[in-house]
Amino acid sequence: MHELPKLYAKADMAARWGVSRQVVKNWETRHEDFPKPVMWVGNGTMPLYLEQDVMEYEKRRRLK
């Protein structure tokens, strides 16, 4: 059985960091080092991000 990587939506990041989804969207717009999506679901409307990229970003930004 293949183990798939854990993926995060922006709502997952918001919950993880204790902020609103709008704050996450603002960070995506303002921070050049915000993680890049690795795939899109929901007919291309929802970006998903690798857990490792999310964890590296939060470490750089001291979010956790």
Image: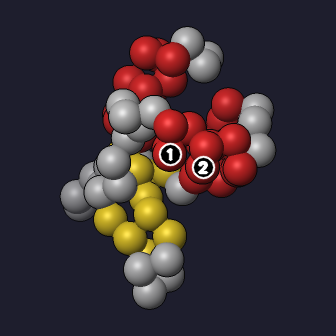
**Quadrant in the picture for the N terminus:** bottom left
Q: Residue furthest left?
A: 2
Q: What is the x, y in percent for residue 7?
A: 43, 52
Q: Residue visible at 35% across and 55% down? A: 37
Q: Residue visible at 70% across and 50% down? A: 21
Q: What is the x, y in percent for residue 14?
A: 68, 42
Q: Nearer the viewer, mark 2 or mark 1?
A: 1
Q: Look at label 2 and name its amino acid.
A: Lys
Q: CA distance from mark 2 to mark 1?
A: 6 Å
The answer to whether the residues at label 2 and label 1 have Cβ atoms under 8 Å apart is yes
In screen coordinates, is 27 left or right of 17?
Answer: left
Q: What is the x, y in percent for residue 24?
A: 62, 43
Q: What is the x, y in percent for residue 48?
A: 43, 59
Figure quadrant of residue 32: top left
What residue sits right under mark 2 in the picture? 25
**Quadrant in the picture for the C terminus:** top right
Is residue 40 among what the camera can see? yes
Question: Is residue 38 or residue 22 the one in the foreground?
Answer: 22
